[in-house]
Image (cartoon, helix red, strand yellow):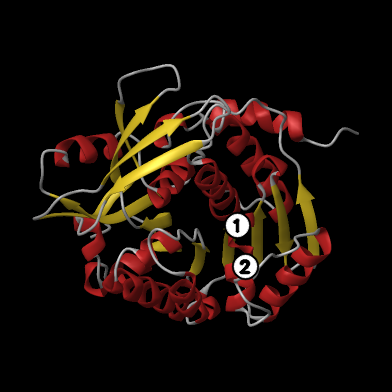
Amino acid sequence: MIRQKLDIFCFGETMVEFYRHPDAEDFHTSFGGDTFTTAAMAARMGASSGYGTLLGEDIFTDFLFNRMSATGVDLGGCKKVPGANGIYFITVDAKGERSFQYYRSGSAASRLASQDFTDADLAASRLIYTSGITSALSGSSAALVTSMLTRARAKQRLTAYDLNFRARLWSADDCISHFRGLIDQVKILFLSEDDIPILTASLGQGSAAGNHQISQASIANLIQHCWSRGLAEVIVRLGPRCAWVGDKTSGQIFHQASLPVQAVDTTGAGDTFNGTYLACRIKHQRSVQDSARWAAAAAALQVTRSGSVAGLPTLKEVEEAYRLLQPHP
């Protein structure tokens, strides 16, 4: 149970990460997970963030818990249960592009269910965050996501969700069906360029199949459809082209540029963006436009180093990169 007031509470799956550098033969051991990376980055940006998951009681339990604790994220929402933790392997090519191999079927975290978090956990947090990966872990975890965001909105808490569709976890049809039932409970939505067909179909604006012509006009139209469904902020991440951001309150849709960097490993870049953005919005009360600039700075730094949580930039580094992105007078 969460025992302190939090700016941001994230929930999902953490896994043991085995990472191999392009010029190495052996794997380095670390840990990751999309929603935890977001929580850890929010903590680095000064937000009080917490995390909830089920940790399997296996040979990795203490390793995971100790590494997670070292990030400054509150782990009051984490429980140790019988079972195994998920593991994954990452290899990265010379261009920084990743290849993954996952072993997570039947993991402890895949058994997350609605009873694992209480109304008191929700009451302790200003914003609740999770992702489509959490939704895809199992039927019970999908039900948990719907329950948590619905209860959060009923308690006037903010909610944020990253579509983060992964075809290896579930079908596009299942993802669309789930998100159609969830979209009215989300206030801040993150997605990648690859997720646009899923969001388009979820809004009833077309099919997820076939080729989608993505342009400034089509993204603006999609964001406006999201606004009509009650979403307040929509962030479409575009990799090295950074992001399009829509703020319903101001009516602005704008492009946020990135810093020119040499990508070493793109693992966790989107999660780093999300954690920075949410910390700026919730903890520091910065504007949507300024928060996007901070997030762009952090994500640019993340891709210049290896690993997900292991590659997170420090607050000082983000501050320096942010200054480079500020508009010149």
Kind of residue at badge 1: Asp
Q: Secondary structure at mark 1?
A: helix
Image spot of residue 164 (x, y percent)? 50, 58
Is residue 212 visible in this depiction of the protein?
A: yes
Which residue was labeled with disc 2? 197
Circle 1: is it few (<14), some (14-19), or many (20+) Cα within 10 Å? some
| Residue at the front extreme, as displayed | 210
Question: Left or right: where does residue 140 sit relative to residue 83?
Answer: right
Q: CA distance from mark 2 to mark 1?
A: 7 Å
Any mark on residue 194, and which?
1
- In the rendered structure, the answer to whether residue 134 lies left or right of residue 189 reads left
Residue 262 % position (x, y): 64, 25
- Which residue does the image show at 39% across and 66% down from the upper left? 170
Q: Residue furthest right?
A: 329
Query: Which residue is nearer to you in this view: 139 or 187?
Result: 139
Residue in the foreground of this view, choosing between 239 and 311: 239
